[in-house]
Image (cartoon, rainbow, N blue to C red):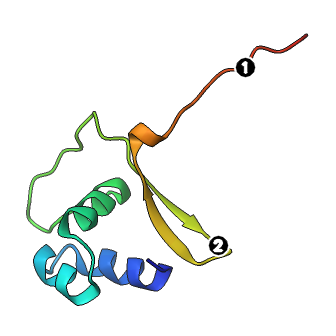
Amino acid sequence: MNYDVFANIMAMYPITPTKKIAELFGVEPSTIKQMANAMGVYKLGRKHSRAPSEANTVVYNARTNEVSLLWGRDCRISKRKSKW
């Protein structure tokens, strides 16, 4: 999705039903919820807590103007031993 769509979805998320946003922009409701959670955007008036097992990250590519969700299980941090 491009950045403008992403920004509109995040702006609408706190006050608009997720199902309605999904219909307007053609994005799965679960994707919208996960992106909002990764960005720290929550529904107004609801209690929230981030699940410790979720480590999702929203990534913006400035060259292509695309926003995507990077799943926690897709990230790998490795340590390479130095020759020195």
In this view, the mark in front (2 or 1): 1
Q: Earlier in the sequence, mark 2 or mark 1?
A: 2
- The dot on residue 62 is 2
Residue 17 in sight in this render: no
19 lies above or below 23 = above
3 lies above or below 59 = below
Counting from the top left corner in percent of width and height, residue 14 is at 20, 73
Q: Secondary structure at mark 1?
A: loop
Q: Residue at x 53, y 33 (%)?
A: 76
View extreme (top): residue: 84
Q: Secondary structure at mark 2?
A: loop
Asked whether, in this view, residue 67 is left or right of residue 6, the answer is right
Q: Residue at x 15, y 50 (%)?
A: 48
Asked whether, in this view, residue 81 is left or right of residue 64, the answer is right
Counting from the top left corner in percent of width and height, residue 51 is at 22, 39
Asked whether, in this view, residue 50 is left or right of residue 65, the answer is left
Counting from the top left corner in percent of width and height, residue 24 is at 22, 89
Q: Residue at x 83, y 15 (%)?
A: 82
* Residue at which label 1 appears: 80
Which quadrant of the figure has residue 33?
bottom left
Residue 21 in sight in this render: yes
Which quadrant of the figure has residue 35?
bottom left
Mark 1 surroundings within 10 Å by alpha-carbon count, few (fewer than 14), some (14 through 19), many (20 or more):
few
Counting from the top left corner in percent of width and height, residue 50 is at 24, 44
Q: Identify the amino acid type marked 1.
A: Arg
User: Quarter of the image containing the N terminus?
Assistant: bottom left
User: Quarter of the image containing the C terminus?
Assistant: top right
Q: Identify the amino acid type marked 2.
A: Ala
